[in-house]
Image (cartoon, helix red, strand yellow):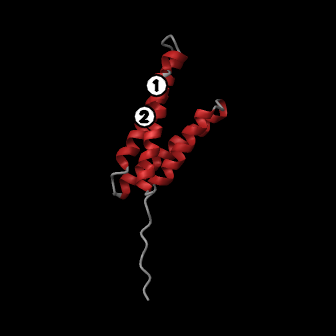
Amino acid sequence: MRIQTLGRALAIAAGLLGAAHLALTPLAYPNWTIDALWFVGSGLAIVVAAAANFDGFGKTGLRSRLFVALINIAMSCFFAAAWLVLPEPQVIIGGVLFLGLAACSLPARKVRPVAS
């Protein structure tokens, strides 16, 4: 499996996680409160990060790949911080997804042929 294929699959999974997060908002928060707003914002952040990954895997430029890698590292850190206050399985899943995306989005090193 190519890295790009794995990355796209992980991006789709992350997007579905974010969509589920958004869809669960009315169930978790029946009234519009500041907590509901934060919940929606977190779901949107996951969806936008997943979309950036899905688009970023089609790019070959170093700058684009580094930007997507930075997004993934930041999202991984946010999930790690969330784990401290909310040790739930979905937090681990999100963290692992974005760690995997970070690994897939790092620019590949060019291998130089060895002169013989």
Ranked by sequence position, the earlier of labels 1 and 2 is 1
Q: Is residue 103 visible?
A: yes
* Quadrant (top left, top right, bottom left, bottom right) of the C terminus: bottom left
Check contact, mark 1 vs mark 2: CB within 8 A.
yes
Q: What residue lies at 52% left-to-right and 49% top-to-bottom?
A: 100
> Element at badge 1?
helix
Task: Name the residue: 51% across, 24% down.
Answer: 39
Q: Position of residue 44 (x, y in %)?
A: 43, 30
- Depicted 43 relative to depicted 2: above or below: above
- The residue closer to the viewer here, 2 or 21, is 2
User: Which residue type does callout 1 highlight?
Assistant: Leu
Whole-percent x, y for residue 6 in the image: 45, 51
The CA span between labels 1 and 2 is 9 Å
Amino acid type shown at disc 2: Val
Q: Is residue 69 left or right of residue 62?
A: right
Say which residue appears at 33% left-offset and 53% top-offset.
59
Looking at the rendered structure, the secondary structure element under dot 2 is helix
Looking at the image, residue 45 lies above or below residue 2: above
Q: Which of these two is toward me, 6 or 31?
A: 6
The reply, left or right, for residue 7 in relation to residue 91 is: left
Residue 17 at x, y = what percent? 49, 33
Residue 80 x/y as whole percent:
60, 39
The 10 Å Cα crowd at callout 1, few under 14, some 14 to 19, many 20 or more, is: some
Which residue is label 1 attached to?
Answer: 22
**Furthest residue toward front:** 1
Residue for point 49% across, 20% down? 25
Which residue is denoted by mark 2 in the rendering?
47
Q: Which label sits on residue 95? A: none
